[in-house]
Amino acid sequence: MERYSNEIRLIVTEKLKTTEDVKSYISQTEKDIANVTNLRQKYRNKLRNCKDDNLIKEYKTKRDECTTMLNKYRKNLKTANYILEDTPKVKEVIKIEMQMKNRQEDITKTKKKDRNLNR
């Protein structure tokens, strides 16, 4: 259930309406991950050569912020991939439920007709 809840939250927050929207979101998120990864690596490189304590604290903070952003992006990317994976399954289930509902309505109509004929 949590997986589906996360999918719905992502769909709502990112205003994803079609599978094409999800695919473009995935590609954009992958680009964002690459950019933040590069930025984090730059801070790591600066840390290696830094001697000033204030700058070290600043670089570590920036590096940790990048890591937090990466975790969020990766989680959202994973959820978006689940959306693409689950969409055909959900459509099939909805189709089956609609067929069952239509059959039940037909049965109900038939029963009502039979009752009216028997009067």
Image (spheres, rainbow, N blue to C red):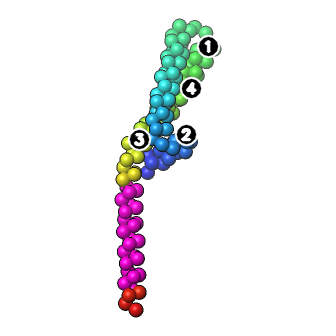
User: Which residues make up the magenta segment?
Assistant: 93-115
Which residue bears the numbered disc 4? 65
Hey, what amino acid is under mark 1? Leu
Q: Nearer the viewer, mark 4 or mark 2?
A: 2
Residue occupying image coordinates x 48% and y 22%: 34
Q: Main secondary structure of the magenta part?
A: helix
Which residue bears the numbered disc 1? 55
SS at badge 1: helix
Q: Residues within 10 Å of mark 2 (few under 14, many from 20)?
A: few
113 lies above or below 16: below
Q: Earlier in the sequence, mark 1 or mark 2?
A: 2
Which residue bears the numbered disc 2? 14
Q: Nearer the viewer, mark 1 or mark 2?
A: 2
Hey, what amino acid is under mark 2? Glu
Which residue bears the numbered disc 3? 84
Q: Is residue 105 magenta?
A: yes
- Distance CA(mark 4)–CA(mark 2): 22 Å
SS at badge 4: helix
Q: Position of residue 17 (x, y in %)?
A: 51, 44
Q: Position of residue 67 (x, y in %)?
A: 51, 26
Q: Position of residue 76 (x, y in %)?
A: 48, 36
Q: Nearer the viewer, mark 3 or mark 4?
A: 3
83 lies above or below 58: below
Q: Earlier in the sequence, mark 3 or mark 4?
A: 4
Hey, what amino acid is under mark 3? Leu
17 lies above or below 112: above
Q: Is residue 113 magenta?
A: yes
Residue occupying image coordinates x 58% and y 17%: 59
Q: Which numbered disc covers residue 104? A: none
SS at badge 3: helix
Q: Are marks 2 and 3 in contact (CB under 8 Å)?
A: no
Q: Quadrant of the C terminus?
A: bottom left
